[in-house]
Image (cartoon, grey):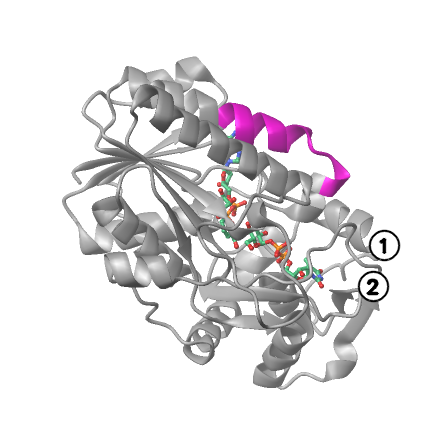
Amino acid sequence: MKKLFVTGGAGFIGSAFIRLVLEKMPSTSITNFDALTYAGNRDNLEDIDSAQHRFIHGDICDRAAVMSALEKNTDAIVHFAAESHVDRSIASADAFLRTNVLGTQVLLDAARARHVKRFVQISTDEVMGSLPDDDAEYFTESSPFAPNSPYAASKAAAEHLVRAAHQTFGLDTLITRCGNNYGPRQFPEKLIPLLLANALRNESIPVYGDGLNVRDWIHVDDHCRAILTVLEKGRAGNVYLIGARNPRRNLDVVLDVLHQLGKPSSLIRHVKDRSGHDRRYAIDPTKIERELGWQPAETWQSGLAKTILWYQKNSQWIERTRSGAYREYYSDQYGTELAPKAAA
Ligand code: NAD
Ligand code: DAU
């Protein structure tokens, strides 16, 4: 792969993917097309070599902007750009339909028009809904679609459009579905960075409902290595589930992090449950392991230790993301104000 077009590369996973590609394949040139929404952050790209990385500030729903940014001999589009937070989709679905559905179709059309060789859709296990509350069932590539939140429904719709582009127009497409990522540079609306940012400042940790919902956690760099593997070796038209065999209850995740930080469990505050809250996600990654030879490099312990260290060392990054509109979002979502400044 010589020339990649990455969407959403100023976000959490997209920026980690660009970093990985430039480390593993330094001669690749990357166009990073990102609208810099509240979740996009130029700070996430600070250490990336600008000779190999061209940043374009643009919206994937803007057909003309996409067409002018996408060069003819592009090897692949890796499509991360999305509205990605379930709670925000419950508050209002508009931006989710616009970016996740319409934006994906704009990119598929552009890929065909520019004869792009591969299209990788970064999707989510949430399109398959919720598993029963026991440990017996796992998501596989043949699990049916059953999205329960507006976010999940918009990502499912995007997958259908990608499939249709393959079936109808013969576009070389791949779809990856991963579980919950954690790691450096994740916007602190998601559980682990919110928990770390709050705990480091001795602020309370909101846990939805009984806290026994299960999520399947993976370090962001393992997710990115899996995407790169799919991009290079995946079979056109296929879906690949990505997971590190690491399902955990939310309360156990919170207690684990508080323990590592030496903070008391009394920081936990049980709050009103999320509407339509999926109970359990658990991924069977056998297909990507057997067919493409991918394996995660991080354990939960090693990945979490690195993540905690990053947030401890990057308090300025946290302060910047928690300023402005985030404070309003936080008080609307949790009915409580954040402390005016770091008290740690
Ligand atoms: P994020 O919210 O951190 O970043 C999203 C990025 O997309 C931001 O940089 C934002 O500016 C950009 N963006 C949003 N709307 C845009 C538009 N209209 N045009 C151009 N750019 C736009 O998201 P993330 O957590 O890094 O997730 C990336 C992708 O991975 C998403 O597609 C998400 O559905 C998927 N995913 C995420 C997880 C997870 O745990 N975070 C797990 C599985 C799949
Ligand atoms: O499974 C993959 C998905 O994981 C991705 O597709 C999404 O983009 C990503 O946001 C994530 O979705 P979740 O809804 O699972 O992640 P979130 O971090 O919001 O929540 C994780 C769990 O923690 C979930 O059960 C809700 C709970 N939670 C979350 C927050 C923000 C809390 O208990 N308290 C909170 O304050």
**Residue receiving disc 1:** 335
- Determine contact: label 2, label 1, CB under 8 Å: yes
Left or right of residue 217, residue 262 in this image: right
Quarter of the image for the C terminus: give it: bottom right
Q: Residue at x 43, y 43 (%)?
A: 122
Q: Secondary structure at mark 1?
A: loop
Magenta segment main secondary structure = helix
- Residue denoted by label 2: 271
Disc 2 under 8 Å from ligand 2? The reply is: yes
In the rendered view, would you say 288 is above or below 66?
below
Tell me the mark number nearer the camera, choosing from 2 and 1.
2
Distance Cα–Cα, label 2 vs label 1: 10 Å
Q: Residue 284's quadrant in the figure?
A: bottom left
Q: Is residue 197 above or below residue 107?
A: below
**Residue 6 image-quadrant placement:** top left
Does residue 59 show up? no
